[in-house]
Amino acid sequence: MSGGRRDGRRRPGPAAAPAGGGPGRVRLIGGRWRGTRLEVPAVAGLRPTSDRVRETLFNWLMPTLPGARVLDLFAGSGALGLEAVSRGAAGAVLVERDRELAQALRALAARLPGGDAVEVVQADARHWLDAAPQAAFDIAFVDPPFADGLWEAVLPRLSAALVPDGWLYVEAPATAAPAPPPGWTLHREGRTREVRYALYRRGGGAVSSPANESAD
C-alpha cells in the first residue's frame, strides 16, 4: 500500500510506526498541502514510502501533474495520491482494502481544503480494476504489500484504466523488477537499500533514456 504497506517487515527510520505501539506519521512534502501529517497506524509491517523516494518521483512527474487524473491503487497512508493532488493533479482515486485505513483517508480528505478532489474507495485492488472505467487515469501508482506479490495480478489489468500516453509508477523490493504490461517503456528508475522504484510511459512520443538514481 503506497505510503504505508503491510509487507511483513518493519522499515527503520522516523516515518515508520514506533515500537511503543503509538501511531507513526509521514508528511506531504510539496504543494498546497505541504506539511500535512498523515497518520500511520501501528500495524506490524506497515511501511511508509520515504520522503526521499516521493520527492524524486514527483520531480520526475512535475511536468505531467497539472490537471492529471491519478490512481493510487494501494493507498495505505495515502501519501502518493494525496501528494499528487497537493502538487496540482486534478483529482485522485485512492483504493485501499483495509476498512480502517480507508475511513481515515476519507476523514483526512474531508478536512483538507479542496479535498473533494480525492475519492477513497474501500476495495480489493484486483476486484476494483476488473470494473474500473477505461482510460480514466493519466498516472497510476502501484506499490502493493511486498509479501503478497500482487504485481503480476494487477499490472496487466491496469492498461485499460490508463490513457494511451499514461504514466505508471511501480515500487517493489530492491531485488525485484516486476515487468510492466506490454507497450510500456522505462522512463526513470531508482533504488534504496530496500526498494526499487520505476516510472514507465506508454506511447505518446519519445521517452527519455532511463536514468538510474539513488534515494539513499
Image (spheres, helix red, strand yellow):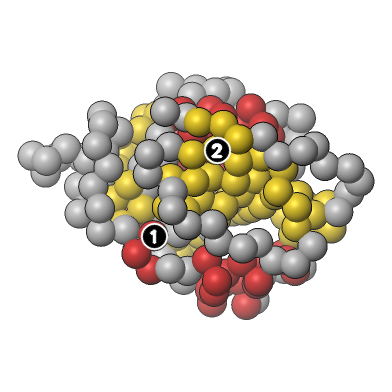
Eyeballing the image, is 26 above or below 165?
Answer: above
Q: CA distance from mark 2 to mark 1?
A: 19 Å
The disc at residue 171 is none
State the residue in front, 78 or 211.
211
Residue drawn at 23 percent across, 47 percent down: 10
**Residue farthest to the right?**
205
- Residue type, numbered disc 1: Pro
**According to the image, label 2 marks what residue?**
190
Taking the spot 66% from the left edge, 39% from the top edge, the residue there is 188
Q: Is residue 71 left or right of residue 14?
A: right
Q: Is any part of residue 130 visible from this angle?
A: yes
Q: Which residue is mark 1?
A: 145
Along the horizontal axis of the image, is 160 left or right of 72?
Answer: right
Q: Give x and y (percent) for residue 22.
A: 14, 40
Q: Residue at x 30, y 33 (%)?
A: 15
Give the image quarter of residue 56: top right
Please name the amino acid that badge 2 sits on: Gly
* Quadrant location of the C terminus in the rendered image: top left
Q: Residues within 10 Å of mark 1 (few under 14, many from 20)?
A: many
Give coordinates of residue 143: x percent, y percent: 49, 54
